[in-house]
Amino acid sequence: RKEVEQDPGPFNVPEGATVAFNCTYSNSASQSFFWYRQDCRKEPKLLMSVYSSGNEDGSFTAQLNRASQYISLLIRDSKLSDSATYLCVVNNRGGLTFGSGTQLTVLP
Amino acid sequence: DAGVTQSPTHLIKTRGQQVTLRCSPKSGHDTVSWYQQALGQGPQFIFQYYEEEERQRGNFPDRFSGHQFPNYSSELNVNALLLGDSALYLCASSQPTQPGLGNSYEQYFGPGTRLTVT
């Protein structure tokens, strides 16, 4: 079983749609959690850290459920510029463990 | 404020050769981590350097080694290259651990070095 598992995707949605990504992790001792986005042939960029209390950044909302070892990302009112691969990431005292990523394409 | 920089951007090597990749962290960051990203996969953690020592290592063979310099910059060395080493090599830096606050472990990536082994 992979340490971090994500929806396989790809997701193709119309502009303005709401889209949700889900992720589970296997190491209950994981300490910090993130969503990164990666554009084609570019480096991953930190989108947001994820906290148990939930957090928002513009049209992005992230949630962590430690009991279920589950992380989610919600994108509301999606824009063409949101098209990218979204990577679920956990950290266990040092190196980051990435999921395989979910590709999102927002269509005009 | 310069972000994480890496050199070279692209590299082509032959099987059996050795390669050195370089990374300069974001200003104010003292910890450097290296990752390997194969096509269609998420990045895989190679190792992390802090205070010029390897602090943590992922599941990579000893052919992969590194170094951190007093100015926090870092090198990744790969010996006896295999075709399977072809990948994007990413460097990430993070802020110092803050006493009492711990480390948020937010890591910021450089643009990567694309290595092709033929």
Image (cartoon, coloured by chain):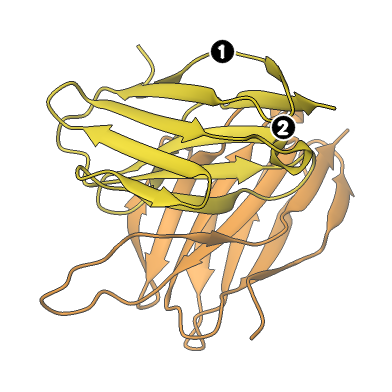
Q: Position of residue A67 (x, y in %)?
A: 12, 25
**Chain name for mark 1:** A
Q: Is residue A2 left or right of residue B1?
A: left
Identify by letter the chain in yellow.
Answer: A
Question: Which corner quadrant of the image does residue B106 belong to?
Answer: bottom left
> Left or right: where does residue B85 sit relative to residue B93?
right
Regarding mark 1 in the picture, which secondary structure is present there?
loop
Residues packed near mark 2 inside 10 Å, few (<14), some (14 to 19) or many (20 plus): some
Q: The residue under label 1 is which amino acid type?
A: Pro
Residue B42 drawn at (x, y percent): 57, 32
Please tell me which residue is depicted at 40% across the width and 49% down the height of the picture. A56
Which quarter of the rendered picture does the C terminus of chain A lie within? top right
User: Which colour denotes chain B?
Assistant: orange
Q: Amino acid at mark 2?
A: Leu
A69 shown above or below B36: above
Q: Quadrant of residue B21?
A: bottom right
Judge by depth and name the residue closer to the eye, A86 or B109.
Answer: A86
Secondary structure beneath dot 2 equals loop
Which residue is found at the position 51% from the left and 81% from the top?
Answer: B69
Name the subunit of mark 2: B
For label 2, the residue is B82
State whether discs 1 and 2 lie on one chain. Answer: no
Q: Which residue occupies 38% across, 39% down?
A: A62
Between tags 1 and 2, which lies in front?
1
Return the mark for residue A8.
1
Q: Which residue: 18% across, 21% down?
A: A68
x then y, percent, for residue A36:
53, 44
Front-lying residue, A70 or B73: A70
